[in-house]
Structures are given as structure tokens and as C-alpha cells.
Image: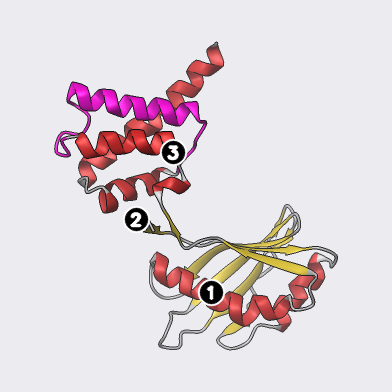
Amino acid sequence: MSEVLDVFQNLFIHRSKSSREELRQNLIDHAVFPWTHVSDEEGEEVEYGEILLMERAENGKLPGVRIGLWPTVDGYSILNIIPIKTGSINEKIYNEILQEFANLVVFPAIVDGNFSVHISKGYQSIDDWFSPTAVAAFKRFSNAANKSTGASHPLDNARWIAFLIDVHRNRQSVDSDFFFRWMVEIEGWSEEIAHHLVIQYEFAGVLLQKYDETK
């Protein structure tokens, strides 16, 4: 496997024949320790219904958290996993909690076959985001560039611009935070230079899009 970054997983529950209310009640009925349904703070209505809140008690293995299940057109998706005590949790802990919630609550709740579940991967590589030609262009830039000066050298700048143009040509929209992490954690760029390049990446995307709209 090529180099990858840990990322936050997503969970989607889709209903086929049954109603969302039945799905909601199934999830509530199957909330087992350390998971409980938080009914006293619910009530927020969004486009497709009411947000469903679940809470996990801290048990020494994993922290106490609250999960918000957001109603979608055909089911629910996880809105977020929020720690009850600590300020934040990393991708590894987040995904462990999501997997536990899926195994203890979600899968038992959909056993009748009227619902399906999709859980996204817990890791991603640059190949998941950019086209093969853009990946090749980026690697040509990153492998050859002086990582202390970014894209300031004319040859480095030409390779960087070739990458930006390829990204735009293939209509790719890649999360800037992920791209920043990739440059720092995988490619070995300093945070300062990577931040500067990501700003250029974001600006190039907007500029080239506006240019296309004027043609």
C-alpha cells in the first residue's frame, strides 16, 4: 500500500422500505452500554427531520462522547463525534468510537434488512484525491524542489504551476487541510512553507475558475 494519512471516517445509514421513524426507533431501542439515547436535549429540526443524539459513557478504554446523527433524504449520517470532557480527539480514537457505535448499535438495529450501512475508509492517500496526472505532476515538483524555498526557483515554480493547472483541468476540489497534512507529514515540507503553498493552491483554484467563467 502507498503512503496514507489517517482521516475521520463517515457513517451513513440508508433505509430502503422502512420509514425514518422506524429507523430512528430501531437505533434508540438498540442503544446498549456504554451507549445511551439522549432524549432530553433533542428537538432540533433540520431539512429532513430531527437530529438523533447518542452518548457514550467513558469506560477507561475510550472517552465519553456524544454523537449527532443527521437526518438525510434516505436515512442518517454521523454529524460529528464530540468529546464530553476533553477538547478534541484524534482520527484514530474517533474512528475506534465510530466502529464501536456501528458494531454495538447500528448493525443490530438494521438486522431486518430494510436498511444498509456505509462506512468510509479510515485512511486516504493523495491518489484518492488527485488524478494520476496531477499526482505525477505534484511528485515531480515535491521531489525536485528545494523544500526550504518552496516554489521560488523558476524550475520549481514551473513544476508547481503545471500541477495547479492539471488540478484545475481535471476539475478536482481537494480539502486544503488534507493537502497541508500530506505535504508536512508525508512529503516532509515545513509547516510554514506548506502553508504558503496551500494558500497558493487555494488562490489558483479560485482564479482559474473565475477565468473560465469569463470565457
Q: Identify which amino acid the numbered label 1 is placed on.
A: Gln
Q: What color scheme is it? A: secondary structure
Eye-nearest disc, 3 or 1: 3
Residue 41 sits above or below residue 76 on the image = below
Residue 99 sits above or below residue 36 on the image = above
Q: Which mark is residue 3?
A: 2
Was residue 100 drawn as part of the magenta stretch in this picture?
no
Residue 6 sits above or below residue 204 on the image = below
Answer few, some or many: residues within 10 Å of disc 3's Cα (few below 14, many 20 plus, some between 14 and 19): few
Instruction: Name the residue at the front extreme.
Output: 1
Quadrant showing the C terminus: top right
Q: Position of residue 212 (x, y in %)?
A: 52, 17
Dot 2: element:
loop
122 or 63, which lies in front? 122
Answer few, some or many: residues within 10 Å of disc 2's Cα (few below 14, many 20 plus, some between 14 and 19): few
Q: Residue 71 occupies which quadrant of the picture? A: bottom right
User: Where are the magenta residues, as a range?
Assistant: 146-174
Q: Please give the name of the residue rendered at 79% of the width and 65% of the height, measured from the top-left corner.
A: 20
The answer to which of marks 3 and 2 sits earlier in the sequence is 2
